[in-house]
């Protein structure tokens, strides 16, 4: 790994300075790079053709990502199936992608070193409006929100026992999701509607806390959110009933 200055941005993509992030734990960065970026991976991802499934093109034409985030970075939508076939992620293919709405933000650590001008979002041909803005919210959050990398949430979840979903979707993500839903008139699916509800009620973990890696602070926030969800279960169920992906709760 090339030399990184104390005050340089941490190579992990957290948005924090190196001295306040992985300084002293450089071996984790090496493992991260080895595990996530096989030789030639970035080049292969960059060759994936751009797709215009669903409302992809309309949303990108109307959304000036660079202006919104005050960066020069734009978004590229690529085919999820083609990306998964590369084998650069442990994620399984979620059923028939021609009939299933699915998407993910490709870990920016895999591409930014060679293509700093794009964030890559992989989506299925049957991608829904809610899934599209969910992935766009991840990109906007990474560039100009919490600046946390959802691809790095799993180890933190294992360490803190906080639900992965809460670490992947910080408060700033909730802001961008609400912005995009309003901008494009999207009715959120059940899972995103829960995220929206938690955001409206100030019950998403701030990105600053997630980025700090403070296990006790994360546990405290997580426990409070879980308790809030439990106390408002019926209200949440009414909010999401009938939306895409809704699963009726089992009667006890």
Image (cartoon, rainbow, N blue to C red):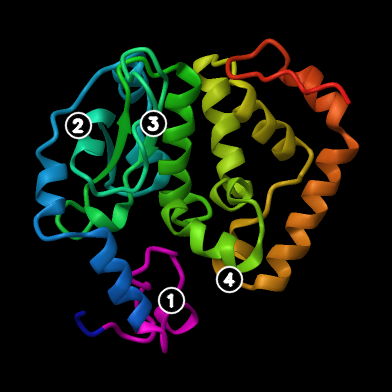
Query: Residue beneath label 3, please?
Result: 103
The disc at residue 17 is 1
Q: Residue at x 44, y 84 (%)?
A: 19
What distance separates the C-alpha of mark 4 from that of mark 1? Answer: 11 Å
In the displayed structure, does residue 166 sit left or right of residue 12? Answer: right
Establish if 192 lies above or below 14. Answer: above
> Counting residues from the N terminus, which is met first, the one under dot 3 or under dot 1?
1
> Counting residues from the N terminus, which is met first, the one under dot 4 or under dot 3?
3
- In magenta segment, residue 189: no
Query: Residue beneath label 2, please?
Result: 82
> Counting residues from the N terminus, which is met first, the one under dot 4 or under dot 1?
1
> Counting residues from the N terminus, which is met first, the one under dot 2 or under dot 3?
2
Query: Residue beneath label 4, please?
Result: 212
> Counting residues from the N terminus, which is met first, the one under dot 1 or under dot 2?
1
The range drawn in magenta is: 4-26
In the figure, residue 175 lies in which quadrant?
Answer: top right
What distance separates the C-alpha of mark 2 from that of mark 3? Answer: 12 Å
């Amino acid at each position: 790994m090339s030399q990184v200055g104390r005050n340089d941005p941490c190579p992990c993509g957290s948005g924090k300075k190196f001295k306040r992030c992985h300084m002293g734990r450089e071996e984790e960065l090496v493992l991260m790079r080895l595990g996530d970026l096989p030789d030639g991976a970035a080049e292969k991802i960059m060759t994936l053709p751009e797709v215009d499934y669903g409302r992809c093109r309309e949303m990108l034409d109307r959304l000036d990502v660079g202006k919104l985030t005050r960066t020069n970075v734009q978004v590229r939508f690529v085919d999820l199936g083609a990306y998964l076939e590369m084998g650069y992620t442990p994620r399984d293919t979620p059923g028939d992608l021609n009939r299933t709405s699915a998407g993910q933000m490709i870990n920016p650590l895999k591409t930014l070193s060679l293509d700093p001008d794009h964030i890559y979002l992989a989506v299925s041909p049957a991608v829904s409006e809610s899934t599209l803005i969910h992935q766009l919210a991840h990109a906007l959050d990474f560039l100009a929100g919490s600046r946390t990398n959802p691809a790095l949430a799993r180890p933190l979840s294992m360490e803190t026992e906080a639900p992965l979903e809460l670490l992947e979707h910080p408060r700033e993500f909730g802001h961008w999701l609400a912005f995009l839903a309003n901008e494009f008139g999207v009715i959120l699916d059940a899972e995103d509607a829960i995220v929206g509800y938690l955001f409206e009620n100030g019950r998403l973990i701030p990105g600053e806390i997630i980025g700090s890696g403070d296990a006790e602070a994360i546990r405290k926030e997580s426990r409070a959110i879980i308790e809030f969800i439990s106390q408002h279960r019926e209200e949440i169920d009414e909010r999401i009933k009938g939306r895409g992906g809704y699963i009726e709760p089992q009667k006890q």
